[in-house]
Image (cartoon, rainbow, N blue to C red):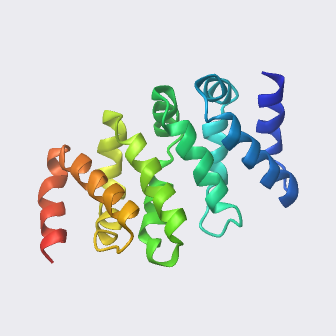
Amino acid sequence: SQSVAAIGKALEDSDPEVLSMALQAMTAMTRFDDGTARALEAAVPEILTQLLDISSSFLELELRAMFQISRHPDGKEAFVAANIIPKLGVLLDTAQNLSIPVCQLLVGTLNNIMVNKEGKKRASECCLRGLVSLHGTEDKVLKVAVDTGIRSMREHHPARKEIDALLAA
């Protein structure tokens, strides 16, 4: 528990080397439920939400940690509460400029969060266009994730017409 707090504090460090190591440690730790539970106790989703930025040198590491934590039921709720979804939307809007691995983690994290009803509603409000813009991707893994996300968003009734119109265009 103290190690998680130390990693959480390191995530707020301005030294790039410290931040990189902290993100790597957080990702490794959250591969397991007990590590994720400790990360949630240390408010790591809030810290990661604050860190997330398109210009970050560690975008892939940040998204990998978010992906891991968002797989946990409480992680989904914590990211919704931390208001991560608009930031994911901004990234999705610029996804054409991101690497395939970053896009895979981005869409995977969004899909994890959309299991949460409120997460799905918020995602359909600010991530829909960006997600649909990736629909024609050549990468098979990303294509499956995008299709899964679109199907999930369609469950939020107000989003259906817009999705259909965007896909038809």
The N terminus, quarter of image: top right
| x 82%, y 28%: residue | 3
**In which image quadrant can residue 38 be found?**
top right
Quadrant in the picture for residue 137: bottom left
Question: Could you tell me which quadrant the C terminus lies in?
Answer: bottom left
Q: Residue at x 62, y 28 (%)?
A: 40
Q: In the image, is residue 76 above or below residue 37?
A: below
Residue 59 left/right relative to 94: right
Q: Is residue 85 above or below residue 118?
A: below
Q: Is residue 26 above or below residue 4?
A: below
Asked if residue 70 can be seen in this view, the reply is yes
Q: Quadrant of residue 20?
A: bottom right
Q: Residue at x 39, y 60 (%)?
A: 141
Between 24 and 158, the one nearer to me in the picture: 24
Can you see residue 15? no
Residue drawn at x 53%, y 64% is 101
Point out the residue furthest to the front here: 140
Q: How many marks?
A: 0
Left/right of residue 99 with respect to residue 89 in the rendered view: right
- Give whichever of 143, 76 is nearer the camera: 143
- Image spot of residue 48 (x, y percent): 64, 46
Residue 100, horizontal then vertical, whole percent: 49, 69
- The correct choice, above or below, for 35 with respect to 27 in the image is above
Rendered location of residue 41, percent (x, y) = 66, 23
Picture coordinates of residue 89 (x, y %)? 43, 60
